[in-house]
Image (cartoon, rainbow, N blue to C red):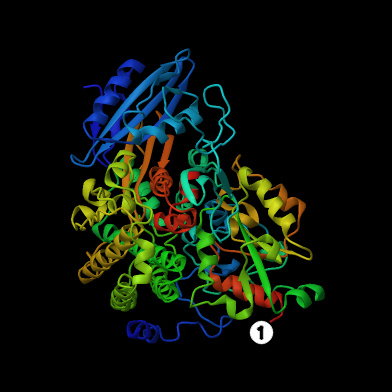
Amino acid sequence: MYKGLKIRLAQGEPAIKDLQKASLPELFRGMPQIDGQKFTDGGKKCLEACPTGAILPDPLRIDLGKCTFCSLCTKANPEGAISFTSEYHMSSSTREGLITDGSVKMIRPEMASEKIRKYFGRSLKLRQVSTGGCNGCELELNALGNVNFDLGRYGIEFAASPRHADGIVVTGPVSKAMSKALYETYEAVPNPKIIILFGVCAISGGVFQDSEEIDRSFLKDFRADLYIPGCPPHPLTFISGIMDWLDRK
Amino acid sequence: MKRLTVQNQRPFELSLVPELTAAEFEAEGRQILSEGSRMMGLFEVEKTSGGKKVLAVFGNNETSQIYIVKCVFPKEGERFRSFAYEFPNTNYFECELAENSGILPEGHPWLRPVRKQNTILGNIPYQFYRVEGDEVHEVAVGPVHAGVIEPGHFRFQCHGETVYHLEISLGYQHRGIEKLLLKADDNKRALLVESIAGDTVIGHSMAYSLAMEALSKTGVSLRASVIRSIAEELERVAMHLSGLSGVANDVGFAIGAAAYGRLRTLVINSLLLISGSRFGRGLVRPGGVMYDLTEGAVKKITENLLIVQKDIAEINDFMFSSTSVMTRLEATGKVHYKWASEVGMVGPAARASGVKTDVRQDFPYGAYRYHATQTVTLDSGDVFARARIRSLEIEESLGFILERFVDIPQGEIFSEVKALRENTGVISLSEGWRGEIMHAILTGPDGKISSYKVKDPSFNNWYGLALSVRGEGISNFPLCNKSFDLSYSGHDL
């Protein structure tokens, strides 16, 4: 028993106090910035270097829903026209909101509807559905429950059954084999319910967008409520996104 | 000789691989397997109007040799006599070949789909294996599980609480990686490799990068090699901590789950200090590494690892001496040596059953050629051994990293990758935290990649999990599953 107490004491207070204001190391690749003036070629090399087609021309913008944060664009353009900051507040409640021209410093999600806030503002239970990803997103979602992030303190938790959930969190590009299971899981969630897309694969297909083995019809049939970009998204991107969306402090 | 003998990451001219008939292939394959080698890959490399060409890759842990055999199947004779009955380690590879190419292993004891559950192999649609009798019942779970984990389908044949047989049916994560790898350019291919299994980013990108360097005869600086191996060991420590946290959680040992989880955060944040990603994405590329290791990072990571080293010793001591934990771990989910070696298990799961296999030792690569690691084995093959071995490997890896930090070689971190040589092949093995990873890459006459085969260690080990629950109470399944900690995405590709 003394051993147990000793270990408990050694843990200290590992929880991050303010998850909206925590800062990440400089090397972390978060919100990209574009400085159009620094391009010597109008951004041509960056456009060519991007493996997922996340850079859009005229004017140059980055689609966070396609960006894997691989930073090849910064290497293709050593003048520093595109750079990644350590800003993790990147979630958006619309797909278009993920397309940034770099002048916007932060994407503040629009507010969820009054009804959603009334229902889920204090307690939100989510059912995660993994659909053909690589397990990176699952690891970060699991990390949300650890002692550092401790998502449970905000009343946000992952439920074992869709029947107990208020919505689903989709990870992965939606493989053909998971398409039906995704529909069925969503149908099993009682109304009103929300859809959160976690990670670049769920949002756009990511590196798998050209695969013959994926079937994204679920995402054409249903509109998502919240988009969390990243490959995989940092847990703080999820927490800050969801807190802003629910208008919670 | 009817085989080509090569070493890990040594390129070979494709014309040197002798082309055998099915009968010669059967004889040579049996010969190689009976010498104590294990199958590492069996895949179609070429389809011509005259038939199909298949490459079989075998590895021998004792001699560090890799044997390659090529078989040409004529159009009307796409079949061979299966090895699986005598050498069970080839079982799943033969199923995979049949599913992907239609070549039939005759006399296979248990031919079943690997990733596409509706494929018809031979003539009859596949049926789950069933146990029948009074009070026998079937439990079906998945693909959507109760936790935040990947999808897979499990069928248990039970009598009361006791599991007689478990069949694991996967493929839900199949997203066509191997096909995409052929179409992709260099930039995209590296991203795809990192997404084979998102928890083994470094392990897979090591195998890929080393293969590309071999095919293009690109030299990598010592500094880059050392940074890579530091990242690989950090990944191993992080995922082993995550696994221990999972095991602790599954037996209701909350303080262990919390403490291991907290330490894991320190380790993946250390990886972030090297690569800008908590999983090491964007770090390892053909030619070297993309980020240099700064002195500031070394200092901070050393601090983190010293905390891990100190704390983990105490937590291990507490957990592995606690009676309530040990009664759940010991003698649960046993896979004894004979089974583990016969079915060709790899990685920590195999080492926990006494099978001495570790690519870093058996087929050394990169910095492990100069800086050896110790291979730890245990022999009880139960959940305890699979958990304990991970804690021992954490200690070993931490020691390895801290030693490297003392004297990191100077030099460039990246060298330009030259063009790939034509008509060349390479077998590239690395030891991911789950075990042996294999990437086989062949180039065509134009110097472009013509064939890409990936094998994740999970491919070897899923069957081990099915064996571990035989005779167990069904409620022990989650614990057995966690102790193996296998990848669905790595298997499904």
Q: Identify the residue at image location x=62%, y=76%.
A: A240
Q: Identify the residue at image location x=26%, y=42%.
A: B8
The residue under label 1 is which amino acid type? Lys
Quadrant location of the N terminus of chain B?
top left
Q: Secondary structure at mark 1?
A: loop
Report whether residue A59 is seen.
Answer: no
Q: Identify the residue at image location x=42%, y=62%.
A: B280
Counting other residues with Cα less than 10 Å from the Cα at mark 1, is it few (<14), some (14-19), or many (20 or more)? Answer: few
Q: Is residue B317 above or below residue A160?
A: below
Residue closest to the far front = B134
Would you say A58 lies left or right of B428 here? right
Q: Is residue B28 above or below residue B402?
A: above
Would you say B64 lies left or right of B120 here? left
Residue B377 spot, x, y in % from top left: 24, 55
Would you say B275 lies left or right of A95 here? left
Closest to the observer, A204 or B167: B167
Report whether residue B97 is seen.
Answer: yes
Q: Identify the residue at image location x=60%, y=74%.
A: A239
Disc tally is: 1
Q: Is residue A223 above or below residue B417?
A: below
Q: Is residue B342 above or below residue B208?
A: above
Residue A219 spot, x, y in % from top left: 71, 53
Q: Quadrant of residue B107?
A: top left
Residue A85 spot, x, y in % from top left: 53, 72
Label 1 chain ID: A
Q: Label 1 belongs to which residue?
A: A249
Closest to the observer, B92 or A91: B92
Residue B65 spot, x, y in % from top left: 22, 37
